[in-house]
Amino acid sequence: MSANLGSGERQRDIAPGVMVRVLSACLSQDAGFLNLERGDFLEVEEVPHESLWAKGKKQGTRTESGWFPIGNVEVCPSPMQIMRPGNGYLSPTSPTQVSRGFGGQSVPLYAPYGQQQILFPPARNNTQSEMGQGDIFAEPLPQQPADDGLTYATTNQQNQARSRSPASISIECVCGKILSGSHARGNFTRHLKSEGCTTSGLERTRHHCTATGCDKNYARSDGLGQHMRNKHPELVQAMTEGKANWAF
């Protein structure tokens, strides 16, 4: 039935337990499965001595076994055996097709199990043109969300920095006076010397008017300045023109 029907090499290779693939369509010798299509796989069950026929079972069907001509088949593992390594079969060592990998390397579509090589794209050279190189670059990874612990730590550090800023400084005197703001420390020192602080042992500072015949004095310098502008404007004018050696 086939030009290879009497091939001694093929006849020796086909033995019970061997998987064979149909090369050309053929008919069964008995009432088993009556037709075999090219590409079908069969498991050999029996090969009579010096017979050109073998008994087998078609894979993937429930059809009972039947006899088929050896000349129409070749020894080849079935897809199920290729996918299940460890049963004595390997995928074909000679690839039937070749694919182009990264950088133009030839990559076999089929290789022996356990010997597959994973090819990565070549390192990108910054001097290469962005277009026309033919190489493939990976998509940039999406930015990962910040870790909750890191976010909490960063927020805590920012809060601490704000608490140390001059605008958030607050000082409370033992007399109950609270001074805050960027000038809290300087104001606190002046407060201790003022009459407003009833618990400080420091000498009180008084600001006296130097106008002739005026005995006014103030605990704060701005109070004295307001008095001078209201009651002694001539002295303020002289001070502005540099004719008086006095300041408040």
Image (tube, grey):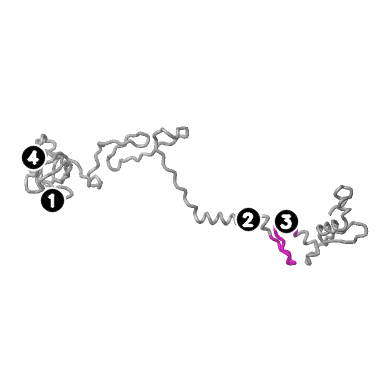
The residue to which callout 4 is attached is 52
Labelled disc at residue 183: 3
Disc 4 is placed on an element classified as: loop
For label 1, the residue is: 63
Check residue 162 in the rendering and tell me which mark sits there, or answer none.
2
Badges 4 and 2: C-beta atoms under 8 Å apart? no
Q: Earlier in the sequence, mark 2 or mark 3?
A: 2
Residue 18 rendering spot, x and y as whole percentages = 16, 44
The quarter in which the C terminus is drawn is bottom right
- Side of 20 relative to 230 (left or right): left
Image quadrant in which you'd find residue 93: top left
CA distance separating discs 2 and 1 = 83 Å
The magenta span reads: 170-187
Query: In the displayed image of the protein, which residue is found farthest to the right?
Result: 213
Quadrant assignment for the N terminus: top left
Instruction: Say few, some or many: other residues with alpha carbon within 10 Å of mark 4 (under 14 / 14 to 19 / 20 or more).
Output: some
Q: Nearer the viewer, residue 194 or 234?
A: 234
Kindly identify the amino acid type of the residue bearing the numbered disc 4: Leu
Kindly report which numbered mark, 3 or 4, lies closer to the viewer in this rendering.
3
The alpha-carbon separation of the residues under discs 4 and 2 comes to 94 Å
